Image (cartoon, rainbow, N blue to C red):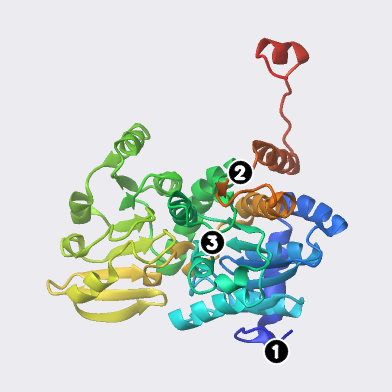
Amino acid sequence: MYMESMIRNIALAESGHKKIQWVERYMPALNAIGEKLRKDQTFKDKVVCVSVHLEAKTAYLAKVLHEAGARVIVTGSNPLSTQDDIAAALVEDGLTVYAWYGATDEEYFQFLNKSLDHHPHIIIDDGGDQVNLLHTTRQDAMENLLGGTEETTTGVVRLRGLDKDGLLKFPMVAANDSYCKYLFDNRYGTGQSTWDGIMRTTNLTVVGKKVVIAGYGWCGRGCAMRAKGLGAHVIVTEVDPIKAIEAVFDGFEVMPMAEAAKIGDIFVTLTGDKDIIRGEHIKNMKDGVLLANAGHFDVEINKPELEALAVRSFEARHNIQGYELANGHIINLLAEGRLVNLAAGDGHPAEIMDLSFAIQALAAKYILEHHQELENHVHVLPHEVDIEVAKIKLQSMGYAIDTLTAEQKAYLHLD
């Protein structure tokens, strides 16, 4: 198994085991679901490819699937989010891993292709790169494929584009669109982990600074909320007038990026689109600003235009590249413009990913049990799955809720 895998260093495994054991204690919903999956050997003799940011929580999900009978093939979904000690620990536990930190683009896609060489029955994707390969150069790897699940908003957008054009070749479950995923992962997970990555990397304060949040979706809401809690003056930029009104009603200032660029101290992009911060914005920024991206791909901050404006660039600090403009201002780009919460931190807290990966485990089970009746479209898990996960999570946190009486159900015409 060691020979088959491609990782940085198997000797790092001990550190990885400790990290995985730590998060396992804080993931009670996945523990409860995993216990049943293990008992039933739900995924016996099935090959599951997991292409998700390779850190401790992802590793624990992969182990749950492995212990439930699957042959699990793991690769990353971002060149800077793989933790080499986690990869080593998984290999030592008998999983196949193709990933290492700092992979080149060529290596990254080599790893994805090697994972598909195993001809999976189920894929768990994050961002859509694996699905894209299956629809383009790796259609040969679909011979056993029953379907898959998608972890994040960007990936779901790509899937719905394929679906709309009638090009989706297998059923996909949008795990991201389950309530127990996006209401918590995107809002509270991104909200906390983005600032964790920024503060850990810069060792600077947030309090008193003007923070510009680009995009007021669920991730943007979470980042704005946490920035406010840290004492920042928060400015939101948006293209959707409804979301902009919501930001105003939530107590934030709203303006175009062209105006925000002149006054912001810290910029965080969370739109999923490209060129949110461009050269025309950068040349008007103050000295010492921080640019961070929390969207899936490193396209939201236009790096070529930033580089073209710079008279020199230098490593200002680990994971921070400084760019000096002609006017002497320094623009600091964090984590190469990649997902700052993972490329410069440990990603979402374990308690948040507990909900997300409980959904992912049940989504994989849903594909296994219902693939014959699922058409080649993007599907959302039944609401009962969200209810099941939420009940487990509430109970693990020591909370109880009311239930409707028969008379109350009758009054509301509920069965």
Of labels 2 and 1, the one closer to you: 1
Which residue does the numbered mark 2 point to in the structure image? 180
Q: Amino acid at mark 1?
A: Met
Asked if marks 3 and 1 touch (Cβ < 8 Å), the reply is no
Q: Mark 2–mark 3 contact, CB under 8 Å?
A: no
Picture coordinates of residue 60, whole percent (x, y): 70, 64
* Residue 3 marker: 1
| Residues at marks 3 and 1, CA–CA distance in whole angstroms | 26 Å
Residue 360 is left or right of residue 251, and the answer is: right
Q: Nearer the viewer, residue 233 or 126?
A: 126
Between discs 2 and 1, the one toward the N terminus: 1
Q: Nearer the viewer, residue 138 or 339?
A: 138
Mark 2 or mark 3, earlier in chain: 3
Dot 3 or dot 1, earlier in sequence? 1
Look at label 3 and name its amino acid. Asp
- The residue singled out by tag 3 in the image is 126
